[in-house]
Image: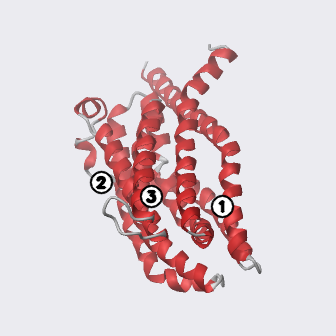
Amino acid sequence: MLSRKEKWKNILRLAWPLIIANSFWNLQLTIDRIFLSNHSTESLGAAMAVMGVFWVPMALLQQTAGYVTTFVAQYFGSQEKHMIGPSVWQSIYLSLGGGILFLGLIFCSRKLFFMMNHSPNITELEILYFNSLAYSALPTALVAVASGFFTGLGNTKTVMAINAVGLVVNALLDYAMISGHWGFPAMGIQGAGYATALAGFASALFGLALVFTRKHDRAYQLFSGWIPNRNLLKRFLRFGIPSGLQWALEGMAFTVFLILIGRFESGDAALASSSIAVTVMMLAVLPALGVAQAVMVLVGQHLGEKTRTARTSSME
C-alpha cells in the first residue's frame, strides 16, 4: 500500500510533463497573437473570435479521439496489452473521419460569421482565418491519438516532446507566412492558420512515428491491430463522445461571450483585449489540467489492475 507521499510523487511524476506540454500549446497561441498583433489589431481580434467558434467542434473531435488514453491505461493495467493496438486504430479512424468532415465547415463559414454581426473588416478576416485553420483539425486529432497512447502508458515525457515539435514549427512558420519571409508571400491572418495546420501535421507525423515502432508492435500489436473493430469502436464512441461534448459545451459558452463582445461599439479592440486576457488566464488553468490528466491515467491503470485481479481470482 503506497503512502500519501508516494501517491503524490506518482501524480507529479506524470503531471509535470503534461503541464509543460499544455503550456507549449498556450505558448503557441501566444506566439500566434504576437505576430498577428504586429500585423494589425483587427487580425488579433478576429483570431480570438475564430478560436472560440473553431474550438467547439474541434474540442468534440480532439477530446473524443484523446479518450484513447483511458482505453490504453486500463488495458495496460489489466495486462491485456494486445487490445492497445486495436484501441489506437479506432481512435485513428475517428480522427480521419472527423478531420475530413471538419473541412465541410469551410463551405458554411461565410454565412456563419456574417450571422455574428461583427464589423465588416473583422468578419472578412474571421472567414479567412477559419478556412485556413480548418485544415489543422485532422492533425490535431492525430496528435491527440499519439499523445493519448503515451499518456495511457504513463510515458508523459514523450507527450511533451510531441508538443514541442508543433510549437517550434508553428513559431517558424508564423514568422515566414504572416509577414512574408524566406520566400513565402505575406498572408497575414490566413498565414497564421496555415502555419498552425502545417505545424500540426509535423507534430502528428512525429508522434505517430514514435508510436508505430517494432518495439511497440511486439508489445501492443499496433501493426496487426488495424482491422476495424465494430464493438470496440462502439464502446469508444459511447464513452468518448460525452467526454468531448463536455469540452465542446464549455467552448460554446465562451464563444457566445466572444460574439457579444465583438458587437460592442469598439468590438475590434474588445476582442483584441480578450485575446490577451485569455492567454494570461490559461497560465492558471494549465497546471490543474495537467494534474487532472495524470490522475485520469492512474485511475485507469488501477481499474485495469483491479479487473486483472478479479479475473485471476475467478480462475483459481
Left or right of 247 in this view: 235: left
Q: Which mark is in front, 1 or 3?
A: 3
- 114 or 42: which is nearer to us? 42
Look at the picture and state if 11 lies above or below 1.
Answer: below
Left or right of 24 in this view: 104: left
Q: Amino acid at mark 2?
A: Pro
In this figure, which residue is indicated by the disc labeled 2?
A: 228
Query: Badge 2 local density, few (<14 within 10 Å), some, or many (20+)?
Result: few
Q: CA distance from mark 1 to mark 2?
A: 42 Å
Q: Position of residue 161 (x, y in %)?
A: 42, 36
Q: Position of residue 192 (x, y in %)?
A: 46, 63
| Labels 1 and 2 touching (C-beta < 8 A) | no
Q: Position of residue 276 (x, y in %)?
A: 67, 57
Q: Secondary structure at mark 1?
A: helix
Q: Which mark is residue 174?
A: 3
Query: Badge 1 local density, few (<14 within 10 Å), some, or many (20+)?
Result: many
Q: Which mark is in front, 1 or 2?
A: 1
Considering the image in quadrants, where does the N terminus appear?
Answer: top right
Considering the image in quadrants, where does the C terminus appear?
Answer: top left
Q: Which mark is in front, 2 or 3?
A: 3
In this figure, which residue is indicated by the disc labeled 1?
A: 275
Q: Secondary structure at mark 2?
A: loop
Q: Position of residue 289 (x, y in %)?
A: 63, 42
Q: Residue at x 50, y 80 (%)?
A: 109
Q: CA distance from mark 1 to mark 3?
A: 17 Å
Please tell me in which quadrant of the rendered image residue 249 appears.
bottom right
Is residue 231 among what the camera can see?
A: no
Please tell me in which quadrant of the rendered image residue 40 appears.
bottom right
